[in-house]
Image (cartoon, rainbow, N blue to C red):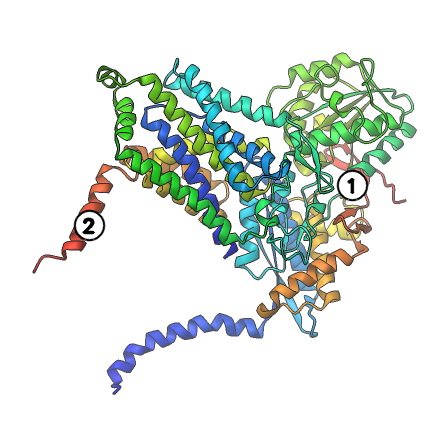
Amino acid sequence: MEFYFGLAQIIGIHVILGLSAYVLMLTGQLSLAQAGFFAIGAYSAGILTVLFQFHIVPALIIASLVAGLFAFLIGFPALRVRGLMLVVATIAFSEVVRLFFFNLSWRKTIDGIEAGPDSTNGFREIRFFAANGWEPYQVTLFVWLFVALVMFLIWWSDRARSGAVLRAVGEDELAAHSVGINITAVKVAAMTAGGMIAGIGGALYAHTATYVDHLTFTILLGTFAIAYPILGGLRSVFGTLLAVVLIQGVLVEGLRALGDWRNILFGVIIILTMNLKPGGLFDTQTVQALRKGLAFRDKGAPNA
Amino acid sequence: MFYPKNLAGLLPAAACVVMLLLPGLSQAQERTVKIAGWGAKSGPLRSFGVNSEAVLKAAVESINAAGGVSLGDGTRAMMEMEYYDSACNADQAISVARKVASQTEALIGIGPTCSGAAAAMYGIFQKNVDNSGDTGLQFPILTDTAIRPGLAKKSQWTFRNVPNEINMYDELFAWLRENHPDVKTIYGGTETNQAHSKLTFAKVIVQMATKHGFEWVGGGIDGLTGKIGSGSDQVLETTKASNWLMEDTNFSVQARAFKKSRADMLIVSSHPFTTCGMLKEMKRQRVRPKVLVGLTSSSSQETLLGCAAEAEGMYIPTGFAPVTSVAKRVAKAATANGGFADLHSAAAWENAWIIKQVVEETGIMAKPSTLAADRRKMRDGLEALDNVDGLLGSVGRVRDEGESIKPFVFVQATGGQWVVVHDPRN
């Protein structure tokens, strides 16, 4: 079962990463900064549990807040650009973060072992779970507790006024502005929320992998973050979940024997989805079909 | 009450039950020693995984051809190997390790390729055996490729059979000092985003060269002595060395800096892909040092396939060369399996034979019911090893660190081949 628990942890963490981009994409912003926020969360939480012996829960909360703070700070300058320019600006941010951690060396001797970020050597010994006797199923439950929490908050928000405001800005900024919505506040709030969510994902990742280095947070990670909501669709949070299961569960793990062909298949799936289901796998059509199916089952089949 | 018609309906179900039981029955009759390998078979470093798999497959075939492995109760068992692609990726290496440990009956894992992936993967293993408070993975690993110093001591379940670069470069520069007395000054560079290339250059190569009296050009480096790691921060400064990245395809600035240095000896500390790019640019700019030294990982067939002419004359210390009869056989078998034997992949051969030795010495039973105990015996057996037979001679083991001390030779690229120019074993 260890393998399935590990796989469930990877899927859960990537769902959180995908949802961090999902929130932002609701407002029509395409950002590759999620890899940077993920890195900030990973290193912050790792530093707290390893160098300062924090418990994982406060470390996660602080890491999320730190990532959120950075997201808030870059939210304002990011407002000045949109579309492709925003993508380029957020790539630049992610690279700055990555190279910062590439050069960060902060070593302390803990219990006779030198620990902490060690520039190129990466950050080892982030072993809170194993060192404290957490069983793999407990770690998996812990990860999915946060997945459920994030999914619920976004799902709930989508049914409240806040969700409608996010979607309104994403659909038509001018129209949203004309009805009194503060575009700046909404976009910065979405960026901050996305950063906080990515920070949680990064913090969980660092503790399940036990090691992080700058190569973990390349542009590829940022690309995955936006690929999940694109593939799953922005109709529902379950679309991102479906996309992560498809990519991480089926493509990366299930088709491991295909080697490099997996990358080609990944591209093909994205192209096919964008052409055949532009709204994503979990688009309005799919949701309605599912609702119809459920309603049909509840009412029972009509008499022949 | 059963009627013939109902019985007929039960037949497919009965057949299914028998089919499900058959594998179990055959397992009971034929025991096998299962091992698993994993490494980069996709991505830019895929040749490392392809080579390791080819050599490991050849080793398993040779063990089976020699009668297989003797188990604890005297039964002879064949060895079975399965190889997985974990790219050069930490997530995937961890995932494969978990899969092999929990979903297969493999006694031990061999891999992964990249040091970064190995450093991450080792972290999920139990740190100290018998520590019930540590829920890390309890599964033995014997890595063949990931070479970055000091990794195996992360866990008592992880072992490596990789060369010790400190000894290799120490001996190489001593030999160069003796054989090239006209060489006084050195200069070089590395791919700074590849941890192995960078660390070996900044902490080992430059220091070992200094130890043997070679002088870094341009006024030297502050704090640089012959001690490992001395002055390493400064070595990588752009004013001291000329470096590049793994993804770079243009090396004109670096080659120009190499030329301007007018050093007698140049060092190209990188993997085959950028080594070839750099050497080609050096040739284009007519950079002609008296001596050229490369990184251990470039003593491979990939370098010769990519830039044999440009690499002509380059010296590299390596843990593998076809200088013994068995090493020649391994090189041939690896090629037959679609790969090449080099200092990294050749260790996979030794690993398979080490596993055979440990199985026979510790009385491993290779039964599904004894899997956990067998894995523990395998770990303890590896820990207890002092010396094992390697392809170039005896391989020493470093107790409590899980590392090896391997014999090595110095090779030089000559006429499209790696030719052994010095064998410190003699």
* Residue at (77, 51) in percent of width and height: B400
Q: How many marks?
A: 2
Quadrant assignment for the N terminus of chain B: bottom left
Residue A242, given in percent of the width and then of the height, sits at 35, 43
Specify the amino acid type for callout 2.
Gly
In the image, taking residue B150 as reference, residue B54 lies left or right, namely left
Residue A168's place in the image compared with A282, above or below, is: above
| Chain where mark 1 sits | B
Query: Which one is nearer the viewer's eye here, B182 or B28?
Result: B28
Residue B10, given in percent of the width and then of the height, sits at 31, 78
Instruction: Identify the image quadrant of residue B7.
Output: bottom left
Q: Secondary structure at mark 1?
A: loop
* Residue at (57, 45) in percent of width and height: B93
In the image, taking residue A51 as reference, residue A41 lies left or right, namely left
Residue B50's place in the image compared with B67, above or below, is: above
Disc sitting over residue A293 in the figure: 2
Instruction: Identify the image quadrant of residue B424.
Output: top right
Viewer-nearest of discs 2 and 1: 2
Q: Residues within 10 Å of mark 2 (few under 14, many from 20)?
A: few
In the image, taking residue B284 as reference, residue A179 lies left or right, namely left
Residue B231, given in percent of the width and then of the height, sits at 79, 24
- In 3D space, how far apart are the residues under numbered discs 2 and 1 (Cα atoms)? 64 Å
Q: From this viewpoint, is residue B41 visible? A: no
Specify the amino acid type for callout 1.
Asn
Residue B247's place in the image compared with B32, above or below, is: above
Residue assigned mark 1: B164
Residue B302, given in percent of the width and then of the height, sits at 65, 36
